[in-house]
Amino acid sequence: MPSELSQAKAALRQQLLADRMLGLKSVPIVPPAPRPVHVEAGKARTDDGPSTKEKAESLKGLDDTQVKVCTKCSLAQTRTHTVFGQGHPAARLVFVGEAPGFEEDRQGLAFVGRAGQLLTRMVAAMGLTRDEVFICNVLKCRPPGNRDPAADEILACGPYLMEQLQIIQPEVLVALGAPAAKTLLNTAQSIGKLRGRFHEYYPSGMEGFGPSIPLMPTYHPAYLLRNPSEKAKAWEDLQMVMDLLGLQRPNKTR
Ligand code: URA
Ligand code: SF4
């Protein structure tokens, strides 16, 4: 039976690790465990599936021939750049956000603004780098003034995300915020209700049909910037993702 003291210690440690996502360096943290090689660049899959190089080419083809020139919804008229997303073409873990913001639209890259910097710290807290995972959004163009994505925009743009996931074939997905979770899970439930446990994403588009990929919904980093007290919950979610990927939790007691 864990004593009250050890429970309190565990709770404190949890908070400290959540603070680490904030980039707070003044607190003592456990030294990171040696990082496992996440994906071996260039290595072909053992099941004779597409190699990393082939996946990279497929992603580039999708971006160059379809997304960059897309006019399927009205956001094409107001965007500066499309934002395909970036990271490892054969990532085991894919993060899906909502839509590009100001900075993303300006640079053509996903999650490079303030929320993106927090996401970078969340990925680092997991012992990973952004190059080892893939980071993208439901919408590839910025909604003016960062308004919520409209239903018709999600309908028009969603197939690009589905295709990205078909190519990458990740082992686990993290949906950042309600629009991503609702789009991928086809549900109307709130993120507060969805988070904290794995759900199933069906690449077939039909629930219960064909293989599925475990998906963890969690809070969007922009929400965490406004509500820092929720960071501990997001960190719990990410640690469950680490468990599923076989990555060592930094706070595991031995
Ligand atoms: N918010 C998102 O959902 N995606 C980004 O790329 C940036 C901010
Ligand atoms: Fe095309 Fe998606 Fe951009 Fe709309 S948001 S124009 S569907 S890429």
Image (cartoon, helix red, strand yellow):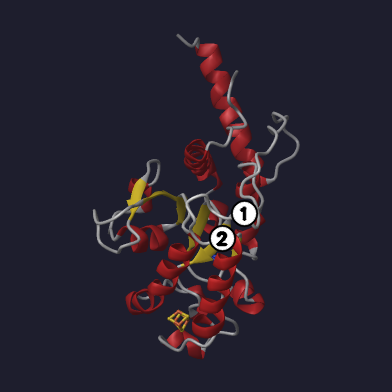
Outermost residue on the right side: it is: 26
In the depicted structure, whether residue 203 falls above or below residue 139: above
User: Which of marks 1 and 2 precedes in the sequence?
Assistant: 1
Q: Residues within 10 Å of mark 1 (few under 14, many from 20)?
A: few
In the depicted structure, whether residue 230 falls above or below residue 157: above
How much space separates mark 2 and mark 1, taking CA atoms? 6 Å
- Quarter occupied by residue 59: bottom right
Which residue is rendered at x = 51% and y = 77% of the image?
Answer: 62
Which residue is rendered at x = 39% and y = 63% of the image?
Answer: 179
Measuring from the top left, give residue 234's x and y in whole percent: 50, 44
Which residue type does callout 2 highlight?
Answer: Ser
Which residue type does callout 1 highlight?
Answer: Lys
Identify the element where label 1 is drawn: loop
The residue carrying mark 1 is 43
Q: Residues within 10 Å of mark 2 (few under 14, many from 20)?
A: some
Measuring from the top left, give residue 223's x and y in whole percent: 50, 55
Give yes or no for contact between labels 2 and 1 (Cβ–Cβ under 8 Å).
Answer: yes
Q: How many dots with numbers?
A: 2
Measuring from the top left, give residue 96's x and y in whole percent: 48, 60
Picture quarter with ligand 2: bottom left
The residue carrying mark 2 is 51
The one nearer the camera, 177 or 216, is 216
Which residue is rendered at x = 28% and y = 55% of the image?
Answer: 210
Ligand 1 is within 8 Å of the C-beta of the residue at disc 1:
no
